[in-house]
Amino acid sequence: QVQLVESGGGLVQAGGSLRLSCVASRRTFYAMNWHRQAPGKQRELVASITSGGSTNYAESVKGRFTISRDNAKNTVYLQMNSVKPEDTGVYYCNAGFQWGQGTQVIVSS
């Protein structure tokens, strides 16, 4: 089974940018997804990308976040621009039934 490792989280001011990365231990043909879980809230799907490059976004991040995928590097990225305090949470990478350990994003106002 594929292992997923996220990185790139941290503290950022509102309006700033951050790029998250998720490296898979091997090539996967599953769609790769970014989810997030804010404190006290349920985990939600933020963005997804198929192996062919088709993307989908939550309404709350459309126009601000971009998901991309480098199949040669077994890596999926989440470029987060114009971040807001409500983007704060733990961001998880997912493919099929596998999940990464998460990376914390904190957006200060």
Image (cartoon, helix red, strand yellow):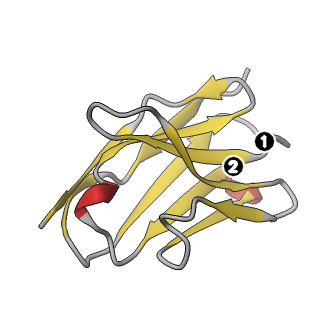
Residue 66, quarter of picture: bottom right
Question: Which disc number belongs to residue 74?
Answer: 2
Query: Of marks 1 and 2, which one's residue comes earlier in the chain?
Result: 1
Q: Can you say whether 33 is above or below 15 in the image?
A: above
Q: Nearer the viewer, residue 41 or 81?
A: 41
Instruction: Name, please, the residue furthest toward the top.
Output: 1
Whether label 1 touches label 2, CB < 8 Å: yes
Examine the rendered structure and indicate whether residue 106 appears above or below residue 100. Answer: below
Look at label 1 and name its amino acid.
Answer: Arg
Relative to 74, 91 lies left or right: left
Relative vertical location of residue 40 with respect to residue 7 in this rendering, above or below: above
Q: Is residue 16 left or right of residue 46?
A: left
Asked whether 72 or 89 is in front, the reply is: 89
Identify which amino acid the numbered label 2 is placed on.
Answer: Asn
Give the residue at x 25% y 78%: 15
Mark 2 packing: few (<14 Cα in 10 Å), some, or many (20+)?
A: some
